[in-house]
Image (spheres, rainbow, N blue to C red):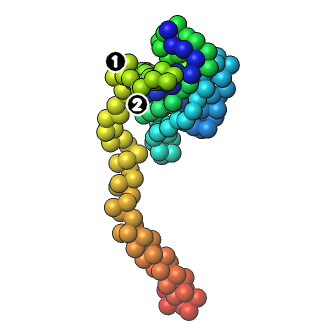
Amino acid sequence: MIPAGTVITYQAKLVTTWTQTSDDLVSGVTSELMQQNIAVRDYNLQGPSLLDKVFNSVPGSQPVPYQLTMTLQTRADFGAAGDVQAITDHAIYNQIGSLPSSSLPNMTLPGGKSQTTGEPGQVTPKPEETIADKISAFFGKLENGFVLIVVGVILAVVLIIAGKHKGIV
């Protein structure tokens, strides 16, 4: 049994639409969990960059998962830690339309010491380089050269226009 006041670390990998903000997601999940006697004490949501989100919205692209870590505190007794996990998974599902891959790596009973649950924590491996990363790197390398080319083209256009006004060209 999980008594009221138990603090649980919840970790999940999830994929959401690129138009939804992290504030919207966490606000919706927090609201649903409060109705189920689970409080969100704090959270950390890490996800892809805006450019990755845009490229991930292209059909056929591989979405980049978000990593969500929340510290939850039960406000009522629950039958098992898996019940809290299932309720939280369902709250996330209601917000994004897909179930997350989640775990509860740590739990602290009221008045007790922190203990591991035996579940592995969610480890976020170094992500593979995405198309957005490659494009950003490409433009980053070309940025200085590109700026010089643009300035040169503008200067050439100005000289041609000025030359036409003076009858040179």
Residue 9 is left or right of residue 34, and the answer is: left
x and y percentages locating residue 65 in the rendered image: 43, 31
x and y percentages locating residue 55 in the rendered image: 46, 40
Residue 62 tag number: 2
Q: Is residue 162 at all visible to an observer of this figure?
A: yes
Residue 168 is left or right of residue 38, and the answer is: left
The crowding category of the residue bearing disc 1, from other C-alpha atoms within 10 Å (few below 14, some 14 to 19, many at least 20), is few
Of labels 2 and 1, earlier in sequence is 2
Residue appearing at x 50%, y 38% in the figure:
44
Residue 24 is left or right of residue 129, and the answer is: right
Residue appearing at x 38%, y 69% in the figure:
144
Residue appearing at x 61%, y 15% in the figure:
76
Mark 2 or mark 1, whichever is nearer to me: 1
* Type of amino acid at the residue the image marks with label 2: Gln
x and y percentages locating residue 43 in the rendered image: 53, 35
Q: State if disc 1 and disc 2 touch (CB < 8 Å).
A: no
Identify which residue, 73 or 140, lies in the foreground: 73
Residue appearing at x 38%, y 43% in the figure:
131
* Type of amino acid at the residue the image marks with label 1: Gly
Q: Which residue is mark 1?
A: 118
Q: Is residue 113 above or below residue 151?
A: above
Q: Is residue 74 above or below residue 139?
A: above
> The residue tagged with tag 2: helix, strand or loop?
loop
x and y percentages locating residue 75 in the rendered image: 62, 20
Q: CA distance from mark 2 to mark 1?
A: 31 Å
The crowding category of the residue bearing disc 2, from other C-alpha atoms within 10 Å (few below 14, some 14 to 19, many at least 20), is few
